Image (cartoon, helix red, strand yellow):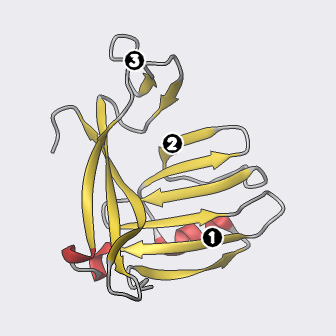
Amino acid sequence: MNKDYISSSGSSENVNETISRFITNGTMILMYTDKFICCELGEITDTAHLLEARVFNEDKEIKLMRPTIADEFCYRVIDDTILSKEDYMEEDHYLDIDSEQSEGNTYFTTGGGSYTLPVTDAEKIRIRNYRSLDKECIAQITDFRVVRFLKKGEK
């Protein structure tokens, strides 16, 4: 399988140091054992309960992950500046937002849950899907990353 879209990968003992080597500004999506946080890039203080982190901007994403809190983190970096537009395709997905209850950067879902985003007036999330060829040269989506949150009416 072709993994040319991955510009770097490996294991990480220090999450914050690894992130700072690849991305200096952007947005973080952090998935913990007991919570989900989306915020501007900053220091991650609770790495003991962190299971996955996606730190991204328009050009690049680093994804750190581990199956359990007892395992070491591994990471992969996608750098779109070294890729051709033929290596990926983009999709915009609507966010689940109850617009009557949501205010500022705190959003309520139609089912009653809530979340915060580092952007006000959000409507969609842009996802970039990466294409690879299998050994029979059949194209497939092998990975994806978050690119950005879009405000209402933004393209």
Tag 1: residue type?
A: Glu
Mark positioned earlier in the residue sequence (1 or 2)? 1
Mark earlier in primary sequence (2, 3) = 2
Q: Marks 3 and 1: CB-CB under 8 Å? A: no
Under circle 3, the secondary element is loop
- For the residues labelled 1 and 2, the Cα–Cα distance comes to 19 Å
Mark pair 2, 3: CA separation: 16 Å
User: Residue 102 got which mark?
Assistant: 3
- Residue in view at x 31 percent, y 73 percent: 80
Name which quarter of the figure residue 97 lies in: top left
The secondary structure type at the circle numbered 1 is: helix
3 vs 1, front mark: 3
**In terms of depth relative to the viewer, which is nearer, 85 or 132?**
132
141 is higher (above) or lower (below) than 42: below
The residue lying at 70 percent from left, 51 percent from top is 45
**Residue pictured at 41% horizontal, 89% vertical:** 135
Numbered disc 2: secondary structure? strand
The disc, 3 or 1, on the residue closer to the chain's N-terminal end is: 1
Does residue 71 lie above or below 133 as drawn?
A: above
Identify the residue under disc 1: 17
Front residue (pair 51, 46)? 51
Circle 3: residue type: Ser
Q: Could you tell whether 67 is left or right of 65 in the image?
A: right
Q: Quadrant of the image for the C terminus?
A: top left
Q: Residue at x 36, y 78 (%)?
A: 132
